[in-house]
Image: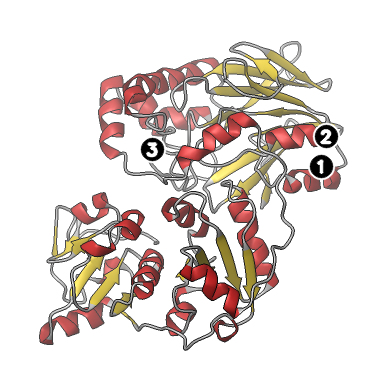
Amino acid sequence: MTTDITSDPASDLTILTIETPTLGNRGYLVHDGEVAFVVDAPRDFDRVTALLDEHNVRLTHVAESHLHNDFLTGGYALAQATGAQYLVNGEDDVSFSRTPVADGDVIEVGGRMRLTALATPGHTFTHLSYALTDLAHDEPTGKQLAVFTGGSLLFGATGRPDLLGAEHTQDLVHHQHASAHKLADLLPDDAEVLPTHGFGSFCSATQSDATSSTIGREKTANPVLTQDEQTYVDELLAGLGPYPAYYAHMAPANAAGPSAPDLSPPAKADADELRRRIEAGEWVVDLRNRTAFAAGHAPGSLNFGLDGGFVTYLGWLIPWGTPVTLLGETPDDVAEAQRELVRIGIDRPAAHATGKPENWSDRELSSFPTATFADLAQVRHHREVVILDVRRADEYEGARIAGAVNVPIHELPQRLADVPAGEVWVHCAGGYRASVAASFLSAAGRNLVAVDDSFDNAEQAGLHLVGPDAGSDAGSPT
């Protein structure tokens, strides 16, 4: 997905966003009609080369704001493929050749674009932002159009400071505050803020609904710029929740220089092979939506639908290195899943199959019922059931159904034995995580019902909620 967000009507530079909404990230391609640079390129960089061809421009520079913790970069492979200079902080310990950059370095791109590297530690110690100046306007110094802020200053938020380990969090959160103020002091109020994170990424400390912003807007709306330092630090740290387990593998892989991904179709598997893979403990992943999966699926297969947080939750839950086989209704579904997976370093699925679940199983299909919170309220009047809440612990503590057991979805594969015996009604905030959880429970042979409903409906359905947020809007999309 790309969007033209040319930042200033007085400038004819073009700034294109390269969006990866499933990971909550953006990269950027900027050109003057002849030459271009890219900031924080996605792993599947064919999206970038397609834009270069579409706009008939030549790529000269690829810049990284930091060694990313939440996705594999395509920057190294893109630079190798195009001959562009690869700009990476000279203090980053990487195993490849790059053009080292440091605070204050100026990079000329063509005859009119200038990038100035700005040290903005906080998300990482070596984080850089890049200020863009259009030299063709406001002579002789040019006009500062925008700043690419990576995981530093986000829309109404900042990047989280805890991804390098608890021993560094205190230092980094104070650095983050100072870095945001540095950007606010150096750049004009009308300069566009162009972050990499903050669109649903767990790299963002908090989330915002904003889709664009400027330095001036952030000065009035962003806590890092409106609060005193200690208040910002205390509130940010208090609000941090868990983040996906696969993050631990991203920075080391980025420091090694990820290769170009192979998106060719994996080998096909028949029902017998799929059964062998399931029984060997591999993951056979059904990509269909939760309604279809509940109605009938290959026993032992797991449901991570493409219609929700597929790659985030699969990457979070899977034991790293476990072979993955993809089941999709169409080849396009499998290809979409592959593209998502390479972005977090799951490069080659073991196999795939397409069609319908009847084609994927050598035995009778498994199924389980789905229901609403109103159905759950009615059932509790006449029999005892286990209510399993798979939301995060902070969501559960805020508002929960009285008597519900909380096993967060990212802990469930290792804690299936903690789910009490009996008929299990599993829910989350919107249905997606509940279906993922239900697939694990189904594979374990449990008697279950998946609640496919918004948690906002629980109290009005007659279920008693407890917790400080009970009675408020306690739900979220998934």
- Dot 1 or dot 3: first in sequence order is 1
Find disc 2 in the rendering and name its residue. 82
**CA distance for labels 1 and 3:** 33 Å
Image check: 474 left or right of 135? left
Q: How much space separates mark 3 and mark 2, taking CA atoms?
A: 35 Å
Residue located beneath label 1 in the image: 52
Residue at 63 percent across and 35 percent down: it is 40
Q: Is residue 318 left or right of residue 67?
A: left
Amino acid bearing label 1: Leu
Image quadrant in which you'd find residue 355: bottom right
- Asked whether the residues under the numbered discs 2 and 1 touch, taking CB atoms below 8 Å apart as contact, a structural biologist would say yes
Q: Secondary structure at mark 3?
A: loop
How far from the left and from the top, in percent, is residue 371?
A: 32, 81
From the image, tell me which residue sits under label 3. Answer: 205
Query: Label 1 neighbourhood size at 10 Å, few (<14), some (14-19), many (20+)?
Result: many
Q: In the rendered picture of this protein, how many numbered marks are placed on residues? A: 3
Reply above or below: 69 against 400: above
Image quadrant holding the C terminus, namely bottom left
